[in-house]
Image: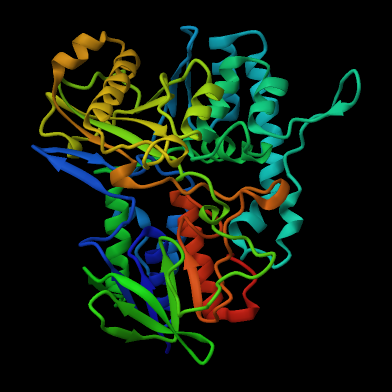
Amino acid sequence: MARIAVIGAGMGSMAAAARLAVAGHRVTVYERSATYGGAVGSFERDGFVFDTGPGLLHLPAVWRDLFLKTGREPLERCVSLVQVDPASRHLFADGSEATLPDASRAGIVTALESALGGGAGERWGAFLGRARDAWDRSRRPLLEEPLWPDWRVLERDPYPAPKRRGLLRTRQAATVAEVGAWELDDPRLAALFEGCVLGYGLDPRRAPASAALLPYMEQTFGSWYVEGGLRELARAVYERCAARRVEFVFGAEVVSVVERDGRAAGVVLADGSAAEADHVVAGGGPPSTAPGRELWGEGDVRPPEEAGGGPLPGRLSVLLAVRGARQASAVHRGVVHAPDTGVEAAAVFGGRVAELPTVTVLRPDDPRTRPDGRHEAITVSATVAGHGDGGRAGVDWSDKALRERCAETLIDAAARSLGESPAALRERVLWHEILTPAETGGIPAPALAGPGGRHLRPANTTRLPGLYLAGGWAHPGGGLAHSGMSGALVAGLIVEGADFKGSR
């Protein structure tokens, strides 16, 4: 039985902790805050409950597998999962709209053709077919296996972009924006793809075409809601850890990793105390280590922040406590698309505020999120530039006037999604709460194959033996499902060592 210190109680860290405890190890989690869950948080006031992180779950099989592998009680006995159908309602800049069913490629194709016409459904269906090929080609190395030492084999984009003969040369779409312009051939379909990618913290102008995996994943495996909010999933994972005798120490900030005899040997806390360990698992980003220790060598994939540039994009959310019952016809997820996603992305990744962003409106039909049937909890959000001091260093989200001005823009978009005037919606709002990247941090993007490996994330192992990385900042990257996969990979590497070939 090994002693294992886990830094942080985020979802990836807890996923690793539960699996390691079941394997017979003694696991202690050190969390600097007063609670668990990391980015999967909640805000409660006056009987209203809001998710402050992700609001929907994709690939629930990742978390079903965790509960299956760590005990006899399945996930559905610990939380109530509801499939969201229809999956989303999209409002485009030209006034057209489309409501898409959940996890039905044929239904999505029919809905898009009926709403947009002109062969839009057929083109989207063909796009999803190519995305499926990319998924089949890259799923295993990107999601289910540790990052290969020879990761450069992932520099080839797995998306089979059709070749188009031009006047001077044959061309293929290499980026998300080019797929939208050259293959989807409709600004509304392009907005559908680009808006999805931007929501994952990726720049559609530069993200590789393999980002087609993201809408494919959502539209193939479905969107799921956890009754009570996604925070309930975090609670269930925490309780599974506790049931497997994982020890949690809250209010305990780890400031460095102890190195002894050339390997990780424990952690040092902010109060000066130290805890010995045979292995250390770090969630939430690379930790400090002994002086002079380099976690990555020449040719290794490094954290994106080491590449320079401004802070990662984050999320602006406005939590609306609303008077008035939710209509029976209301859709759980509405998306109001920006007139030009390219202009929006230039602002987000250029450290500026987008004038008209893509806005997502979540309206769960859940009595647990509202005081009674005469009220409704609505979350409105957009991807925005990260928190900084302005310019390329991000947006100063501590500016109260800026926060309120941007919140008003989101409320206007929410009113459109709800089918009412901005004035009418504001009249129904009892109060609102604003959350920005200053409070919630940046969005770690999922790993993608593509040129230069620019969208890969650091391996779960490091150059310091015994030190592992889990969560959205390590392979296979950000997102709730990806974080769960990261925890499974770290547990496999510790338990099976060099024999571990990937999750099964």
Estimate the x, y position of residue 499 in percent, counting from the top left: 65, 79
Q: Residue furthest bottom?
A: 261
- Mark yes or no: residue 26 visible: no
In this view, the residue farthest toward the right is: 168
Q: Residue at x 33, y 34 (%)?
A: 316
Name which quarter of the figure residue 410 lies in. Answer: top left
Q: Is residue 350 above or below residue 189?
A: below
Of 118 and 69, the residue lying toward us: 118
Q: From the image, which quarter does the C terminus lie in?
A: bottom right
Which quarter of the figure is the N terminus placed in? bottom left
Q: Can residue 368 be seen by looking at this rendering?
A: yes
In the image, 303: left or right of 46? right
Percent from the top left, x then y, of residue 311? 45, 45
Q: Is residue 154 left or right of residue 315?
A: right
Quadrant of residue 457 in the image? bottom right
Left or right, 425 with respect to 351, comes to left
Look at the picture and state if 119 lies above or below 85.
above
The location of residue 429, given as percent across then percent down, is 15, 21
Decide if residue 290 is on the left or right side of residue 456.
Answer: left
Q: Nearer the viewer, residue 373 or 412?
A: 412
Q: Quadrant of residue 10?
A: bottom left
Instruction: Estimate the x, y position of residue 107 in percent, counting from the top left.
Output: 55, 23
